[in-house]
Amino acid sequence: MSNPERIPAGIHNAIDYERIAPQVMEAGRHAYVAGGCGWDATVAANRAAFARHAVLPRLLRDLRGGQSRLALGDWLLPHPFLLAPVAHQRLAHADAELASARAAAATGSCLVASTLSSCTLEAIAAAAGPARWFQLYLQPERAHSLDLLRRAEGAGYAAIVLTLDASIQLASRSALAAGFVMPPDCTPANLAGHAPAAAPALAEGESRIFQGAMRHAPRWDDLHWLLEQSRLPVWVKGVLHPEDALALKAAGCAGLIVSNHGGRSLDGAPASLDMLPAIRAAVGAGYPLLMDGGIRSGADAFKALALGANAVLVGRLQVYALAAAGALGVAHMLQLLVEELHATMAQAGCAQLADITPDCLRSNPTC
């Protein structure tokens, strides 16, 4: 393992943390983090989507007052990078989500803590800064979901991020080929004391998917129940269809996250970036919209902002930086992303995030 208090040599850009990840992570764990599901087609699509857009440089702009601050909900954030809710971060570092939380606090970043975190949501909240959200997976029993909701409210989280696109996930063939098995110390700390739902007994002819794995998948009545119960604004993560986006907005969701779960849900789903413009058009200019899936640089974030996102979430890159150098690595990765975004903004003639529009991009003829 690398020294958690030292940035590894050769880290010049945020994406370098992805390059060195195989050197600092056990092979099976790296395969699990890097992979998605099935043949990893959507993982590849997320990255390829960014290459189809080129940033158009502009000249002679006055950029002396340039900055990347934004308002997101009730929070004024210094930059548009959030740490995505990544489960089981003990796979990457002994301090797990506590290290990511400390990095978020040091950089003024918003942290989204996962239901399936290795550390309790209370411990993560104590280590994070004031800008912290809690990602919720609805549990088979509403009493357990309500318990998580009330704990998040009590721990000072500012929003709930309801993930709806991961009720069923197929294993990544790359992780299977590497022989990955979840280590015994990587258990969801927030669910301790919540007995897992028993697998249903299937009648002859019933499907292991429809009547089995999807038995407790969230439905519209579950969303309405959560909106009624929550004292915090509720965002929904996992949106790819404009009609779903419109319906979720009408239901009263505070904002949406355009996401294909990093390619971990449906292999062959479209890239998040490709669906972003249509969803922005559906919900209108003023509705909060975030995006994740494939962010590896400040230029990637610039393209996502130009196509309709207010901010982006960083998932795998967070884990790679965590594995390389703990909290320091995650903070450094965020600093690099912000500087790369500023450099792209400057060259594109954008002094603030509001200046980043679709006109800043051109189709890349080489892709």
Image: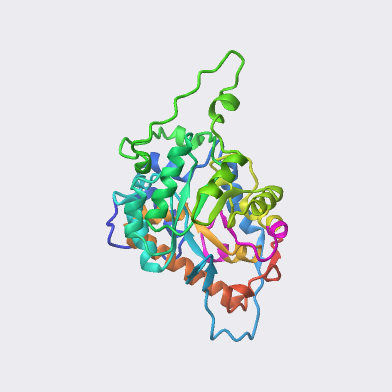
Residue 8 visible at all: no
* Left or right for 215, reference 357: left
| Residue 271 coordinates in the image, percent (x, y) | 63, 50
Q: Does residue 220 appear in this view?
A: yes
- Residue at 70% x, 66% y: name it: 362
**Residue 158 place in picture, x, y as percent:** 46, 59
Residue farthest to the front, as pictured:
228
Q: Which corner quadrant of the image does residue 309 belong to?
A: bottom right
Closer to the camera in the image, 298 or 216: 216
- The stretch in magenta equals 280-301
Was residue 188 drawn as part of the magenta stretch in this picture?
Answer: no
Which residue is depicted at the point 38% across and 60% down? 330
Q: Report the quarter where the C terminus lies.
A: bottom right
Q: Where is residue 145 in the image (x, y as percent from the top left)?
A: 46, 41
Q: Is residue 352 found left or right of 185 in the rendered image?
A: right
The answer to whether residue 51 is above or below residue 36 is below
Q: In this view, does 363 lie above or below 64?
A: above
Quadrant location of residue 301?
bottom right
Question: From what the image shows, is residue 268 above or below residue 24?
Answer: above
Q: What is the total number of numbered labels drawn onto the structure image?
A: 0
